[in-house]
Image (tube, grey):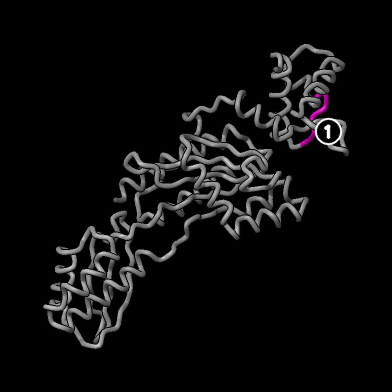
Amino acid sequence: MLDDRAKLLLKALVERYIADGQPVGSRTLSKASGLDLSPATIRNVMSDLEELGLIASPHTSAGRIPTTLGYRLFVDTMLTAKRESLHAPSLAPDQPQKVIVNAAHLLSNLSQFVGVVMAPKRSSVFRHIEFLRLSEKRILVIIVSPEGDVQNRVIFTESDFAQNQLIEASNFLNSHYAGMAIEEVRARVKQELLSLQSEIASLMQAAVQISSEAITQDRDEVVISGERNLLSVSDFSGDMGHLRRAFDLFEQKTQIMRLLDVSSQAAGVRIYIGSESQIVPMQELSVVTAPYEVDGHVVGTLGVIGPTRMPYERMIQIVDITSRLIGNALSKSK
């Protein structure tokens, strides 16, 4: 266990390193801590912290920097984040995918690092369907999901339909099948539409098929914004290997999706420092995540990815506030 003096010096060292990015020496630490201690005493405490694996000495400097373990102790026991001290712009209600993209941009802009948002799973249920005649044998199908997503698809038919026929067809589908899973609708349509005119039946079957493709198609499950921000971070800009690994991570997305999925099962803000998560195995990166809710149910996760030397207190506030903003925006979009 660390005594109060050692904790205070570790806290001062971590905060100074986060602010400056330079290894911290005993004289700098003496001034930063505000403690009336001799340089020799501070060096002894730093030596103890190093033996505990909380700080380390880069081979090019006599100063010390925090280790992953040191950051973890700092984050777990020395942070006092306050929601009210961060003023974030609101997220306007919109189609869910637009809200997700805007939230990722917001995270990136506020943090100046990388914002990531895992989109809610797309429902296989449709709420409303509508047909619009564009030209002869060319029809626009408009599909609305329960979450408010709007999908537009154009289909070509063998027969030409008047607009009043299209309205009749959409009314039939909406009154009989709205709220059902599209797979169930497809099965029932084959049986129940035999009694209708063959042309209308074929139109409805084509519409159900195109709706199935539109509703269940893959969309961006993880939206990432601000990757280029890492180019201006000194921890990365001087090491092309670090940058290359980070950009590979963002391009593949698989590991980020797994980490966000795991984070959605925990309440509140989670912090993964360096390679702690084992899912994003990069010693140079930390991830701060939080789940977001719609109508009291967790539907996704968001976060900020940046250098291990990040201002954790501010990142916690950004992630916490954005999770509530996106939840409110999605709830109002329904």
Q: Is residue 100 above or below residue 29?
A: below
Give residue 204's position: percent from left, percent from top: 22, 75
Magenta stretch?
22-28
Say left or right for 259 vs 203: right
Residue at 36% x, 70% y is: 213
Of the pair 32 and 214, the residue shown nearer to us: 214
Q: Is residue 303 magenta?
A: no
To which quarter of the image does residue 298 belong?
Answer: top left
Q: Is residue 26 magenta?
A: yes
Q: What residue is at 56 percent from the left and 40 percent from the top?
A: 288
- Location of residue 326 in the rendering, given as x and y in whole percent from the top left corner: 41, 45
Quadrant containing the N terminus in the rendered view = top right
In the rendered image, the vertical position of residue 251 relative to residue 273, given as above or below: below
Amino acid on which disc 1 is placed: Ser
Judged left or right of residue 266, residue 244 is right
- The spot of residue 159 in percent (x, y) is 21, 87
Judged from the image, the secondary structure of the residue bearing numbered disc 1 is loop
Residue at the image point whose x is 79% and y is 29% from the top: 24
Crowdedness near tag 1: few (<14), some (14–19) or many (≥20) residues, C-alpha within 10 Å = some
Q: Nearer the viewer, residue 27 or 74?
A: 74
Q: Is residue 198 left or right of residue 2?
A: left
- Residue on which disc 1 sits: 57
Residue 280 spot, x, y in % from top left:
63, 48
